[in-house]
């Protein structure tokens, strides 16, 4: 097959006509396929049904220290859960707060608290004229939604396969006191599946922020979410690295079991320095008496320890690995020969990032939608939903069945080719 | 026995000496009894162990509408839970948001959201010079902690057995635009166990607030928490009443199953007008993808319907009724004859309110503490922990065993008598 850039006007027109016939056929099938969100599929959820038997009516719902998990109390979480989640996050139990069911909610609360009361005695952000966040792009739409909701100005920073452009991060953070934070998904990033290099993490830890209350919002959502047993990304632990670099309080680290057990019914956690923990718990005591300890205990009893959790993650990988591979296979089969688009090949996480020719992403997503395939909205991976190149599309392969996913991808690549060919047609002279 | 006010100096001194001997004996017993918080006891928690079997690994964790409760989504809660909690709150399912495990957290979030973003388009409270709340006193310390944390000025309003002094509430709310809210526990109030009269609720619904964003924070924590089957308080439903009065958006109503199943592992809810719900969900979508639906389903399957829940509450009542009665019995036995103190006799809820002679509450609580009996801190039932009369003490009878409770109350009344007698001694001339 000829590459599109090498085609003349007539060849492009013929290609579009032939693709349109295929597209029409798909449209006639009345499909309803969804690759929009990073949702586990049914088989993945079935892996955790044992959670429902971890605590039955005969069980002793007491912690090792005798605390009755059924009653009020224990603001920052039970020791056993801190132990387990600490091992998952590679942090000491004493650096951890166990929250409710959603790390997104913890991040929202963390921004909200900085906004209303300030971080460790600094001016509340609501009293400042301007607050800014750095946003590595493409990134996670729900991160950007939080900062947008609080009127925080978001500044795009380019992602590389090693993490955010650190020259730019260092320059901005050290020169502008209004920059109070940066959103990071450091391992198997959303949507590219990139993991920050050792050098990137070390440069993060050595930042010299102009703002005393600058914090790295380190959303390690996919810390143990590997696709391959023998080919895994490794991420340097940031809390320890910050401490070494003399910036012990500079990072808030988030994680949850949402994509380990049941999304929405897992446990979320924050790991940070003892200074930050003191600052947070002084506030948290006004917000709640405590989170769901029974569910914390349920998770501890189900997994036993971090090895049980890692074994469990291998089963997830067995289910979703073929899906990631199918996406890559179909992109390579349909788009590589015609030289259109580029895509990542993650070794973990929940997403594949696709870059269409500039100016095509919206059109592709619309086109797919009309053929019954829902993608994450074009632009969603950028602050304010504005992709300056109208190029990036996030692919979420986990939720559909493998058969549905293949069909969805077949349709997707047809949409990409139509859109790309049409775009080229605008520029060819003959 | 002679009333203390009728005793002369010598009689009072003899009384104190004799009480001190008793007190010393108790001190020697090395007790550790706790009547500080409204915590259910072990037997109450045991009532809900069936909750642990409501969903096992064979269960279908789907809603009636087919939603897989294990996965992401459903921001405002599953229909079945809205149905059940709606029946509990006497509101329609469409007026309800089901949250996570803590109604306190919902109240915190509601204040926090008003502070950061304002209510239904009104100025965010953080942008105002002054925000005030009315606080019926005595009241719930955790309510006051929230408003204090946000720098909201709290104004005491006297409680009566019919609810807050409504002349005062009407006067203040209609004249001061800075007054944005009032904390209410309208049924079996904390700590007095009073329920608002029909007249009080109707006057609430007909308030004409100076502030457009004035809201009644109606914490109906004890809506179905009766002690007696045939002698229950009745509360007019406030949402309907506000709608009738032309104030449909004036109330946020809170409830939870914390004292129905497991504190900390139940479900919380907010009921309010559709306008308020729109305002809230527009924010909530930035905060979370959804709360714990599996736990919502667990509660629905466990109770079946509101009748199942009410039957369950009768079992709670059977356990805690004797405790309330023991407290009243001992107060009447030890304090009525000497004419010291006054106390409430609630027909539901979690507390009994005790008023000591002015200037004695702190002393009594300290004294009890030194004999191994922990009470709620004196002053805790007032904003800023300042009881102007140093008189009110909250008694929480549910947590200790009946035997421990009787011992604790025996000690408490000794402490009250010592303190009251000493106070009188300061004033008698001979």
Image (cartoon, coloured by chain):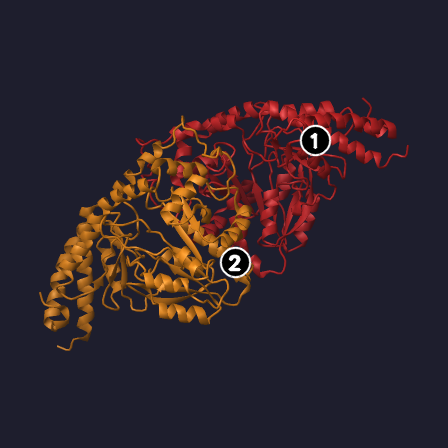
Chain colours: A red, B orange
Classify residue A231 by image quadrant: top right
Circle 2/circle 1 CB separation < 8 Å: no
- Indicate the chain on which mark 1 is placed: A
Tell me the quarter of the picture where residue B161 sits: bottom left
Please report, as a chain letter, where disc 2 is located.
B
Helix, strand or loop status at disc 2: loop
Disc number placed over residue A48 in the picture, else none:
none
Which SS class for mark 1?
strand
**Left or right: where does residue B39 sit relative to residue A203?**
left
Q: Nearer the viewer, residue B298 or B360?
A: B298
Indicate the position of residue A313 as horizontal and vertical percent values: 51, 27
Label disc, if present, on residue A343 of the rendered structure: 1
Task: Give coordinates of residue B232: x percent, y percent.
Answer: 26, 53
Question: Looking at the image, can residue B331 be seen?
Answer: yes
According to the image, label 2 marks what residue?
Answer: B119
Q: Residue at x 67, y 46 (%)?
A: A169
Residue neighbourhood size for the residue with mark 2, other residues' Cα within 10 Å, grouped as few (<14), some (14–19), many (≥20)? many
At 17% from the left and 72% from the top, the residue drawn is B425
Q: Is residue A304 visible?
A: no
Are discs 2 and 1 both within one chain?
no
Q: Residue furthest bottom?
A: B429
């Amino acid at each position: 097959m000829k590459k599109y850039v090498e085609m003349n006007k007539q060849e492009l027109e013929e290609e579009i006509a032939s693709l349109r016939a295929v597209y029409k056929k798909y449209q006639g099938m009345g499909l309803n396929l969804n690759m929009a969100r990073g949702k586990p599929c049914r088989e993945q959820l079935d892996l955790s049904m044992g959670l429902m038997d971890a605590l039955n009516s005969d069980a002793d719902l007491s912690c090792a220290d005798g605390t009755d998990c059924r009653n009020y109390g224990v603001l920052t979480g039970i020791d056993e859960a801190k132990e387990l989640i600490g091992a998952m996050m590679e942090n000491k139990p004493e650096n951890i707060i166990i929250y409710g069911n959603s790390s997104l909610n913890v991040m929202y609360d963390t921004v909200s608290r900085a906004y209303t009361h300030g971080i460790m005695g600094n001016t509340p952000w609501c009293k400042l004229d301007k607050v800014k966040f750095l946003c590595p792009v493409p990134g996670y739409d729900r991160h950007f939604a939080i900062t947008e909701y609080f009127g925080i100005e978001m500044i795009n920073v380019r992602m590389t396969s090693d993490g955010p452009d650190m020259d730019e991060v260092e320059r901005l953070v050290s020169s502008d006191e209004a920059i109070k934070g940066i959103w990071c998904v450091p391992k198997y990033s959303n949507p590219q599946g990139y993991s920050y290099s050792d050098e990137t993490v070390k440069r993060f830890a050595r930042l010299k922020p102009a703002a005393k209350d600058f914090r790295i919002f380190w959303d390690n959502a996919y810390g143990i979410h590997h696709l391959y047993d023998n080919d895994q990304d490794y991420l340097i632990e940031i809390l320890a690295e910050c401490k070494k670099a003399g910036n012990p309080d500079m990072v808030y680290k988030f994680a949850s079991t949402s994509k380990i057990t049941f999304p929405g019914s897992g446990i979320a956690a924050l790991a940070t320095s003892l200074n930050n923990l003191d600052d947070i718990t002084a506030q948290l005591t006004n917000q709640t008496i405590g989170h769901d300890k029974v569910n914390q205990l349920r998770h501890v009893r189900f997994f036993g320890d971090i090895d049980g959790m890692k074994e469990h993650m291998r089963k997830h990988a067995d289910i979703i690995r073929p899906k990631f591979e199918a996406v890559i296979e179909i992109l390579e089969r349909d788009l590589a020969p015609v030289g259109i688009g580029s895509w990542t090949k993650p070794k973990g996480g929940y997403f594949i990032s696709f870059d269409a020719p500039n100016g095509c992403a919206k059109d592709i997503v619309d086109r797919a939608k009309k053929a019954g395939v829902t993608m994450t909205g074009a632009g969603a991976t950028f602050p304010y939903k504005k992709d300056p190149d109208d190029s990036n599309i996030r692919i979420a392969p986990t939720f559909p069945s493998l058969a549905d996913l293949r069909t969805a991808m077949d349709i997707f690549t047809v949409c990409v080719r139509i859109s790309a060919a049409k775009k080229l047609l605008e520029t060819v002279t003959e």
